[in-house]
Image (spheres, rainbow, N blue to C red):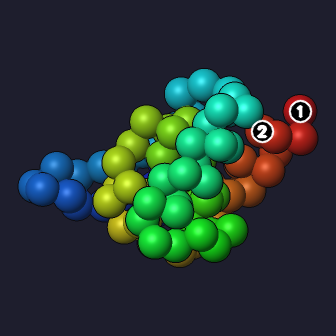
Amino acid sequence: MKLRYPIEIDGETIEEIEFKRRPLARDARDAVRMARRDGDDSDAAREMFLLVHITEQSPEVIGAMDLADYGRLQAELMDFLAN
């Protein structure tokens, strides 16, 4: 997905984020563990860490996304999981 609002992290500009693979059950489990370890066991934190796994981006990149782009990524995730 091409970002409408590119992200700059450590001098690198990220203009696109894509799913690298289908999520696995262990990705959901690992997302829960990561959220708990991060001190935030909310649904939003678990979803963010799931996106970290399947996009192979860092938590900093996913967390720095503009909310409009994040919403589009969420919609793609929902479509992805429905099929």
Percent of width and height locating residue 3: 46, 55
Q: Can residue 5 be seen from the camera position used here?
A: no
Residue 42 badge:
none
Percent x, y of residue 4: 46, 62
User: Mark on residue 83?
Assistant: 1
In the displayed structure image, the side of residue 17 where residue 46 appears, left or right: right
Q: Report the residue at 20% width, 58% height from top.
A: 9
**In this view, 75 is above or below 1:** below
**Up/down of 23 relative to 65, above or below:** above
**Residue 2, percent across and down?**
48, 48
Mark 1 touches mark 2? (CB < 8 Å): yes
Asked which quadrant contains residue 64, the reply is: bottom left
Crowd band around label 2 with a 10 angstrom C-alpha radius: few (<14), some (14–19), many (20+): few
Question: Is the residue marked by circle 1 packed among few (<14), some (14-19), or many (20+) residues within 10 Å?
Answer: few
Give the residue number, with chain letter if any, for mark 2. Answer: 80
Q: Give the residue at x 52% y 73%.
A: 40
